[in-house]
Amino acid sequence: MKLATAAYSMDVLTSWAQYEDKISRWVSEAVGQGAGLLLFPEYGAMELATLAGLDVAGDLEASLHAVSERVPDADDLHARLAREHKVHICAASAPVFAGGARPVNRARFFAPSGAMIHQDKQIMTKFERDPWDVVPGDPLRIIDTALGRVGILICYDSEFPLLGRALKDVDILLVPSCTEALAGYWRVRIGAMARALENQCVAVMASTVGDCRWSEAVDENTGAGGIFGPPDLGFPSTGVLAEGALNVPGWTFAEIAEDAVARVRRDGVVANRTHWEEQDARDLVITSVSLR
């Protein structure tokens, strides 16, 4: 299977047709390279706020509502593209008012049939907590697909090993991200690589890139696409299957053997996923000893 992950730059949109053309073009490009699963980044949908005008896009609270109102149309578009191209697509996450007073950060995953399942972010960053007031949503899910079992940890979630452990049975872990600074990009990348090591799976990271001065929410973006695996049997010694150039928009691709994850879990030099439980069997109480 071939995976595609985006380093995605957001635009000021003047019409819905412009957005439709943009997403269609991105999908067509990845499909043209043979990709069967496409990952867009966290909060890449914030550009939808510009359809309501730059005054709305520049107002944090108004932009959250403006994007949420456009998500159903964006979902229809992604579902149609998934059906037309017969691919799996994880759309860029968006703030969604899902019946509550405050929005969740929601990624939506589309099957080649056009069927959709969503995944909400679990743990909010400081900025999401205040001033965004974005809240945790529905729990983690394992999505059974023709490409294997897929899980999604949105950005900051990838930095928490117990969330990753909850998805230990996935073959492909999607990590859509949106990071302002280089340090943020590396935190998420290190988290994604650690989860690939622990769970002996493939982790796919997408990023927003470029400046969006029209937005208080996503004004600066640093990142790159990356695809990682455990540095073990059948994978590169570095664990890096593919990495894009920093802050350069476009797709990053990697081809993975269908049995790669099953093989490394069965025959790898180490067995982190299986041996994880041995931590629970050991006495982890640490005694403080002074050498003064």
Image (cartoon, rainbow, N blue to C red):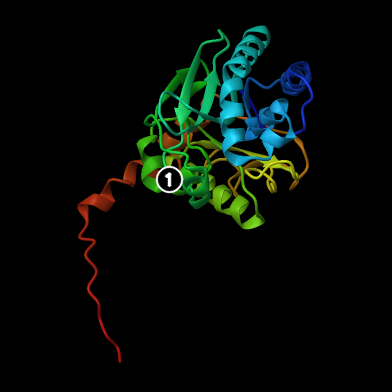
Task: Determine whether, in the image, residue 276 is placed left or right of residue 117.
Answer: left
Residue carrying label 1: 198
Q: Is residue 51 above or below residue 165?
A: above
Camera sees residue 6: no
Residue 275 place in picture, x, y as percent: 32, 46
Q: Residues within 10 Å of mark 1 (few under 14, many from 20)?
A: many
Residue 242 place in picture, x, y as percent: 67, 40
User: Residue at left 62%, top 50%?
Assistant: 185
Q: Residue furthest bottom?
A: 292
User: Residue at left 43%, top 30%?
Assistant: 170
Location of the N terminus (image quadrant)? top right
Task: Determine whether, in the image, residue 59 is placed left or right of residue 288.
Answer: right
Which residue is at the front of the view, 239 or 234?
239
Residue 250 place in picture, x, y as percent: 76, 34
Element under disc 1:
helix
Residue 20 place in picture, x, y as percent: 73, 17
User: Residue at left 67%, top 30%?
Assistant: 49
Q: Quadrant of residue 95?
A: top right
Q: Is residue 47 above or below residue 224?
A: above
Camera sees residue 148: yes
Q: Residue furthest front?
A: 55
Q: Tell me the kind of residue under disc 1.
A: Glu
Location of the C terminus (image quadrant)? bottom left
Q: Quadrant of residue 114?
A: top right
Q: Quadrant of residue 38?
A: top right
Which residue is at the front of the view, 99 or 232?
99
